[in-house]
Each structure stands twice: as structure tokens, then as C-alpha cells.
Image (spheres, rainbow, N blue to C red):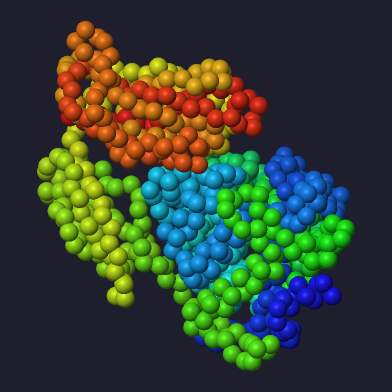
Amino acid sequence: MARKLFILSSFVFILVFIPVISSGSKPYKISISELRDKIAGEWVGQLIGNMYGLPHECKYIAEPGPEKWPYGYSKSLDKLQKCDGAFSDDDTDVEYMYLLQMQKFGPEPSYSQLCDAWKYHIRDRIWLANRAALGLMHFGYTPPFTGNKVLNPHWYQIDPQLINEIWGVTAPGMVNYVASKSNWAALITSDDWAVEPTIFYGAMYSAAYFEKDIRKLIEIGLKALPLNGRFLTTTKDMIALHAKYPQDWKAARKEMAQKYYLDEPEMTKTVWNANLNGACAVLAMLYGEGDFQRTLDLSCAIGFDCDNQAATIAGLLGVVNGFKALPANLYLPVKGWELPFNNKYVNITRYDMPEGKISEMIDQTLKSTIDLVVLKGGKLSGKQGNEVLTINSQAVFNPPLEFYIGPLPVLKIGKRIDYDFYADDNKKYNWSLISGTLPEGLSLTAGKLTGIPTKLGYSTITIQLGNGKEKITHEFKLLVRGENIAIKADTILANVRQVNMAVLDSCWITFGKPMYAKNINVLNDGKTNGIGSVFYSLAIKSNSPKVDYYGYGWKNSQKISMMALQTGCMEEFGGWFTSLNVQYQNEAGKWIPVEKISITPALPETDIVFFQPHFAEYVISFPTVETRAIRIIGDTKIQDHWHKYTKHVSGFTSVTELSVYH
């Protein structure tokens, strides 16, 4: 009886499934009762997978997990009992946050609205590309720049696969719509081929309302992927491995791990690689053959991230078969529970997020689904208790009208500039300059800034963006710089000139090792990203903050009024300045503080890691000084960290470039 009440909620629906196979522009139809049952299957299935997979996360790397199935909840059971229900984790909580934004703003929230939710609710328990994206949001950037590979050094990690199933769940039968929307949403944290598994899953989730066969769902996911994309090739490889070893998942896993982990290029080789973990999920689906328990155990045993694959695939099978087909022992693991996970979703991860009843989360998702389907050309018909939703399978996703805010152009006297204010999604809109004056020598046409700057200084302009129905504006402050005289420096000044590689190797570092430069010579090489671009001032193990400085010396005196610091990638335990000042050397060789410095933008007001942006530029302006040597100087920060070796590393800073201007 408890199961029935959970499914039926506050209304009595007749469980009727009315599939209409889409051909051309023909719509799908589904009863509201069946729609709700499948949404319930997704939420409960995803929670099962998340709780089930957590004890196995990153546990099986060199070898797969043992085939001693079923694994059961293992260590998660204690936490389930303590919470007296399901508990939030990064495989479900951001999706719940997104659902709340759909409730607040409508079924198509904007980047800006989602970013506001990130900045307010997410203050802990976030890693890799998600953490990097959040730091860039606090710096003032918006997607897709927050996931851009030039700014987010974790762009290739698994993160978008964890948090975007919600877009497929709320768009049944709208496969093309979901593929585009999943790509759009994945760019919040990631870039390039790392977003492709998210597109793949989104398409399958959408199609799963009307297709039960796992192989056919995988084919649908393949068709949604970019032609010649990396994950398309990877998925086809997994299909070929399954055909080669139809009864031996371990043999397939071994070849997969060799190619996509052991032989992965060093810059993107991690256990959280998006392509690698996507491959694990495909193998689990193929060898699971639609069986929920077997697929769940395979998702864990194949290894690497584990709980991500388990949550995503269990949610997918929940959509395929509905809540009514989920194994009751998996959602009632604690004695005395009568409703799935005691009908509780206990928030232990996100600031000021409600602790929802699972049944209410399902009803909220149902409402957002109906709202979206109707918005995109579908309709709700029938009497209460017998409603049917007609779905426009040909729906198209059009991103909300908004500016995408990222790094402004680096304008230099006498140097041609060709800069786009737009990204792919808002390129087609109408761009116009409505106030302010462009720097001399430049012009703005259709969102593109071109020309050769001829005058130093700042210019403030306001640009209007319109789509024929609405218009928005945004103010931009442009800076034209002179020659970067750091390139001509005779000496590079730094308190740490050579990275102590033994210290670096003992740290919990999460970036591709080729990123790290061995000495300070990269400070004025003009390279701000990529292999060998980032210098860490790691010297000793001391478990304490320190003062770092970087600067230059010239044989001849220079007149200087501006410097620009380009930071590198930040680790969970440090890498940033907590204060920043400028000093110049007088004729007697004494270091003198520069007065009245202005830093744009200001340094983060907090030392919390989630506010620290990767690859950010800070422009430091001050009254002109004449000197043969100048430097920036400031305090470093070292954070407490769980890794036992990292706990004994001194404070350090991460930099890629320091420019100096007259």
C-alpha cells in the first residue's frame, strides 16, 4: 500500500502508457500517471545508484572490482540509517538545485540564473571542473567561459555527467532539444569532448520514456553526438569490445582501461576523465543487458568514479521501466521504512537548500516537465485523473537571451585586434553599440571588435543585444595598453626560482603534470596557458604561509604605471595571494612601497578555495614610478587538506605571467 500511495501522490491516476512512435513530425503521447511513475523511477533510481556506488568511488583503478555480487550498500548503509533517509551528494544535489531554479524561473532558466544559484547554494563539497567553474563565477565570468578550456584547467573532467540528467528527465521524447540543452548546460563546467557524454546521456534519458531496449537507446545517444567526436568513437569501441568479449566484461574492461586511462595523454590522464568514465558506463549498460541489479553492480565493478556511472545509469533504467519495476530491497534498505528512502532527501551538502520529500521532488519535476512540454508546442488534455501529455518531438532548444561574460580583449597600441563579444549561442542575435565611445582606431560590427588601437587608456561602452522580442544591455570597460616591457627585462626577480619537484610530487595535485613549469623563466614568455605555462612557488615542506614576490630588473631606468598578474591553476590547498602590493627599487637599491595602487578586479575578499579563479588577470595601476626594478609582493595561503602529505606543504602561489607597462 505504501508503494501505491508513493506513486499516486495526491491524485488518483489510471496507469496507462500510450506510446506513439515518432515518425517525422508525429508527436509522442504519454499519460500523466505513467509520466509520473517514470519520473519517480528516475529520482529513486538515481538515489539508489548514488548511495550504492559511493563506497566504490575511485576504489578500482588498476583492477576491476571483485565479482562478489550484489555488493549492497556497504558503508553507505550507516549514513542512510543516520540520516533516516537518502542524503544529498554531488551526483544529485546540483540537479535538485537546477530543479528549484526551474520552479522559480520557468522550465528554461538562463545561465545567469543558474550561476546565481551556484554562487549562493554551493559553498563546500565541490571538486575539479565544478570547483573551477564556481571560482570563475565569483570572479565575474559566466558560462560558457566558466567551462572554457583556456580558463578552466579541469575542463576534461567528469563533472557535467554528474549534474545534468535533469534536462533529459524533464523533456520526454524531445531528443534533439535535450541534446542541444545538455550541451549548453555542460558548458557551464566543461568544454570540447568532455561535454559529449552529457549529450549522450541526455538524449538517452529523453528517449527512454518511449524506448526500452538498451542497445537502441545507445544508438539514439550515438546519433545525438557530434560527428567525428571523441566520445562517438569511444562508444563504438565499447560496442566492439562487447562483441569481441560477449561473456567476459573483465577482458573488455582491461582493453578499455589500457586505451582510455593508461595510454591517455598526460595532460588529461586522471581517474575522473569524462571520456574514460563515459566508456565505463557504456560497458556497464551493454553487459548489464537492462537488468537493474546486474547493471548497478557492473557500474561499480568496472571502476574509476563508480558512483557517477551507477547514479546515471540507475536513473536511466528508472525512466525505462518506471518506479514500479525498481527492486524494493534497494529503496527500502532500512528496517521500518515504508516509502522509498523513507521519503526523505536530507541535505548535507548545499547551503540553504531545502530538505525535500522525495515525493515532492517528483511532483516538482512532473510540473516542470509538463510546463516545458507545453512551452515547446505540446499540450495537456483529458480530464483530471486521465490526463494525457502530447509531446512535440521536433522541439528545438533556443538558449535564453543573455550576454556571455569572460575575459575582455587585451588591447595594445599599434596591435591589430579581432575580438568577439559573442559565443556560438548568441552570435545570431542583434548587436549594437548604444552609448560610450570605442577606443580610437576600433570599430564594433555585429558583436565583433576590430581595428588597431591608437591611444592609451580606458573606455566605457554599453552594448545592446536583441532577438526581435526583447533587448538587454551590458556595460564593458576596455583598456588599451602600451608595450609590455617585462619581455625586455634583464633579470627576473622571485623568492622561489625553481620548483621543488619532490614537494610537488607529494602534493594532492589534480592537473595534468605537463602544465607545471620547473622554473621561473615562464613569467615573461608570453604564454598564459598549456604545457609548461604554470609556475608554483613550492620550495619546502613547512605547513605555514609565506611571502612571495615576482618582478623584473632592467639595466636602464623605466617609467612604470601598470602591471598585470596572470594567475595559474589553483589547487584545493593553495596557490593564491591573500594580499598584493607593489614595490620599486630606489637609486640606493632599497625597496619602496608604491602608494595608491588600484587592483582591477579586486582580489577575492575571502581565502575560501571556491572563490579563487583559475587563469585570472589582475591589473594593478598606480602613479608612475621611475625605477630599474619593480615587483609585486604579498602573502600566500595554505589550506588544511585531507591528503596527509599536502598537510605539510608551505604556502605558495600559482602564476603564469607578469606584465609591466609604461
Can residue 114 be seen in this snapshot? yes
The front one of 491 and 431 is: 431
**In this image, 190 relative to 91: left or right?**
left
**In this image, 444 relative to 521: left or right?**
left
The front one of 5 and 486 is: 5
Give the quadrant of residue 362.
Answer: bottom right
Give the quadrant of residue 15.
Answer: bottom right
Instruction: Indicate the position of residue 322 as horizontal and vertical percent values.
Output: 73, 73
Which residue lies at the image location 45% right of the left edge and 36% below the top edge?
606
Split into 4 quadrants, where in the image is the C terminus? top left
The front one of 608 and 570 is: 608
**In this image, 200 relative to 519: left or right?**
right
Instruction: Indicate the position of residue 636 as horizontal and vertical percent values.
Output: 45, 25
- Total marks placed: 0
Which residue lies at the image location 48% right of the left edge and 59% below the top edge?
114
Instruction: Indicate the position of residue 656 as horizontal and vertical percent values.
Output: 38, 32
Which residue lies at the image location 61% right of the left edge and 58% below the top edge?
354
Instruction: Indicate the position of residue 518 as horizontal and vertical percent values.
Output: 46, 24
